[in-house]
């Protein structure tokens, strides 16, 4: 049986605490490259952090495959498109992905940003999985599977390290690493992020009292700052394939990856995770 590596709880807590007072972001819209002709897929691109990511990408002239009218009003010349899929229903992912791949021959980056947090106990996806696991992990893994051929093909004719797929959260950290291991010659950078503590709709399932307990007297940051974290991972020249599976924290610095995750990424625990995820999504490919 695989032994689970020890966690360094103090170091984890210190990093989590540091998210309440990160340094000012240094990689922002002034530093982003021109993205004319580039296409990015942003899940959950019409609210919260994903909205800001889509907006900032479009301001650099990219096509953001995610969004709706509010974004279009803010930038009339940008191309926004909307692929309809429910990450919590594996039967909808293929058609949503096919909508994207039939319209866009190239994809230059994927931000698997959408997610839910702490839904009511007992919440289930259409296939009966716990809702958070289904939405944040399985739905995205299947979507990524359908987009793989396009992003990997796009990478063949683009400068090294410019194509990326960005993940977040604990299991997503394994996914970010395993994706690179499973696609060793892709030249696509796959890394994970913790966007920060942001004032978004993510806490919709939590009571005001629970939110107050978690936040205490501190202030959540505007969602724009979460976009700075995700876009650091997506666009910074400092992030390369050598950083496979690494973890970026507010507002765009390399974070400390929990040592139990770090140490188990190449062993039987990761293999078990990978096998289980592949088995769940297999029937929907
Ligand atoms: N806010 C924070 O402090 C914080 C901290 C750590 C990590 N994060 C992560 O950052 C990401 C963005 O969150 P946010 O703060 O911007 O929250 P948000 O405002 O609630 O946005 C989440 C997005 O995910 C979409 N989504 C949820 N379930 C979906 C489904 N089944 N299919 C398709 N889309 C779905 C939502 O769409 P609908 O509105 O249509 O449901 C929404 O657009 C999440 O992955 C979250 O876990 C956020």
Image (cartoon, grey):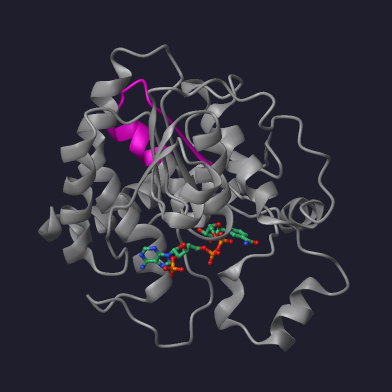
Q: Nearer the viewer, residue 56 or 202?
A: 56
Quarter of the image where the N terminus is located: bottom left
Determine the image quadrant of residue 147: top left
User: From what the image shows, is residue 157 above or below residue 181?
Assistant: above
- x, y percent for residue 101: 20, 39
Q: Which residues are magenta?
A: 177-192
Q: In screen coordinates, is 232 left or right of 155?
A: right
- x, y percent for residue 43: 40, 52
Q: Residue at x 38, y 23 (%)?
A: 37
Q: In screen coordinates, is 43 left or right of 138?
A: right
Q: Residue at x 81, y 46 (%)?
A: 22
- Quick check: can you spot residue 153? yes
The mark total stands at 0
Asked if residue 188 lies in the magenta stretch, the reply is: yes
Q: Residue at x 23, y 31 (%)?
A: 150
Residue located farthest toward the right when viewing the structure as drawn: 217
User: From what the image shows, is residue 203 above or below residue 58?
Assistant: below
Q: Nearer the viewer, residue 220 or 189?
A: 220
User: From what the image shows, is residue 100 above or below residue 119?
Assistant: above
Asked if residue 259 lies in the magenta stretch, the reply is: no
- x, y percent for residue 153: 23, 23
Q: Nearer the viewer, residue 257 or 281?
A: 281
- x, y percent for residue 24: 82, 39
Q: Residue at x 61, y 82 (%)?
A: 206
Determine the image quadrant of residue 149: top left
Q: In screen coordinates, is 266 left or right of 262?
A: left
């Amino acid at each position: 049986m695989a032994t689970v590596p020890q966690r360094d709880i103090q170091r984890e807590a210190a990093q989590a605490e540091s998210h309440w007072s990160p340094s000012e972001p240094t990689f922002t819209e002034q530093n982003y490259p021109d993205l004319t002709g580039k296409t990015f897929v942003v899940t959950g691109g019409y609210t919260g952090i994903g909205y800001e990511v889509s907006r900032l990408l479009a301001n650099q002239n990219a096509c953001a495959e995610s969004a709706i009218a509010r974004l279009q009003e803010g930038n009339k010349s940008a191309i926004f498109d909307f692929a309809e899929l429910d990450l919590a229903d594996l039967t909808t992912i293929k058609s949503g992905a096919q909508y994207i791949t039939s319209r866009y021959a190239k994809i230059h980056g994927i931000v698997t940003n959408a997610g839910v947090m702490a839904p009511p106990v007992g919440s289930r996806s259409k296939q009966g999985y716990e809702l958070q696991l289904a939405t944040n992990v399985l739905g995205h893994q299947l979507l990524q599977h359908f987009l793989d051929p396009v992003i990997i093909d796009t990478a063949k004719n683009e400068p090294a390290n410019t194509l990326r797929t960005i993940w977040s959260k604990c299991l997503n950290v394994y996914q970010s690493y395993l994706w690179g291991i499973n696609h060793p010659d892709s030249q696509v950078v796959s890394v994970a992020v913790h966007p920060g503590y942001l004032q978004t709709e993510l806490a919709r399932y939590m009571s005001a009292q629970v939110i107050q307990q978690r936040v205490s007297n501190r202030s959540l940051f505007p969602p724009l700052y979460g976009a700075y974290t995700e876009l650091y991972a997506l666009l910074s020249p400092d992030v390369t394939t050598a950083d496979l599976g690494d973890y970026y924290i507010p507002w765009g610095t390399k974070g400390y990856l929990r040592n139990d995750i770090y140490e188990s990424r190449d062993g039987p625990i990761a293999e078990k995770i990978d096998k289980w995820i592949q088995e769940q999504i297999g029937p929907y490919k």
